[in-house]
Amino acid sequence: MSAVTHTFEDVKAVILSAHKNNTSKEKVNFYNSWAENYNQDVAVLDYRAPSLAAKCISSNFTGDREAAVVLDVACGTGLVAKQMNTHGFQHFVGIDGSEMMLRFAKDSRLYQDLKQSMLGEDLLPVQWDSFDVVVIVGALSVGQVPAAVIRDLCKATKPGGYVCMTTRSNHDNLEYKAILEQEMKQMEAERLWSCVEVTEVEDWERAVSEQEDGYISGVVYLYKKL
Ligand SMILES: C[S@@+](CC[C@H](N)C(=O)[O-])C[C@H]1O[C@@H](n2cnc3c(N)ncnc32)[C@H](O)[C@@H]1O
């Protein structure tokens, strides 16, 4: 990772520069260019989603966590696996669209396997019914991973396994969040999974848009596959 230390204003400028990216390819190219500074920059934002998701999974998972296999979708540089590892999980497979983010995930030495794939465009490159936990953090939001992908996350999970997802609750993501929650409820009605926990978090991460200040809020969802 780079030794560059960015101020909050620097990080804000980097993220706002990505708002002009409309296609998923452009977004992933943005992550390619951000990868080297990503870990330091999200620390400046007080980005807590990986630790909140890991804590939610850990407090509900009753199986053998040393043997459990976790699919980390949109794994980025590996912050979620790093947090889950502190809770005793040891086996991770990562998927991301960004080659550079995957390069840093590889350097973390936490993943048994890493695959490059564009979620929402490519077929999820895993076998169905094969993971004890599937987790997606920081990627279910407007302009990133389409909400419909959560059906495939459920398919990839073993019956009885868990799917943990996060999203932002700030203004520009509200329409996406409503679509996501509708899909979650529809899948519950189809008896594909049941809701275990929904945690609304006020201090999700520091706001970067001109319209917001302080912290934006976010949500951690945990579902159990039936
Ligand atoms: C905010 S980062 C989150 C990374 C990691 N989960 C974390 O919490 O630190 C979002 C990640 O999603 C990936 N991503 C965004 N849209 C994607 C898509 N459509 N297909 C695959 N990866 C995507 C990006 O490359 C990036 O690594």
Image (tube, rainbow, N blue to C red):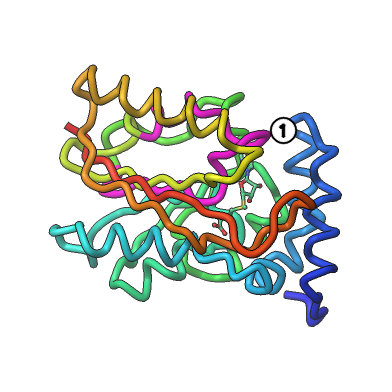
Q: Quadrant of the N terminus?
A: bottom right
Rendered location of residue 93, percent (x, y)? 44, 52
Residue type at mark 1? Ser
Is 13 in the magenta?
A: no
Residue at 14%, 58% in the rendered image:
63
Q: Is residue 54 above or below residue 88?
A: above
Q: Is mark 1 within 8 Å of ligand 1?
A: yes
Q: How many marks?
A: 1
Q: Is residue 54 left or right of residue 48?
A: left
**Residue span colored magenta:** 131-153
Residue at 60%, 55% in the rendered image:
76
Residue at 50%, 34% in the rendered image:
177
Q: Quadrant of the C terminus?
A: top left
Residue at 58%, 62% in the rendered image:
205
**Quadrant position of residue 162:** top left
Q: Is residue 186 above or below residue 103?
A: above
Give the residue number, with chain letter if any, for mark 1: 24
Rendered location of residue 182, percent (x, y)? 40, 24
Instruction: For label 1, count other residues whose C-alpha is less than 10 Å away and answer few (under 14), some (14-19) or many (20+).
Output: some
Is 148 in the magenta?
A: yes
Judging depth in this view, the residue of 100 and 56 nearest the camera is: 56
| Secondary structure under the numbered disc 1 in the rendered image | helix
Q: Is residue 98 above or below residue 106?
A: above
Q: Is residue 115 above or below residue 189?
A: below
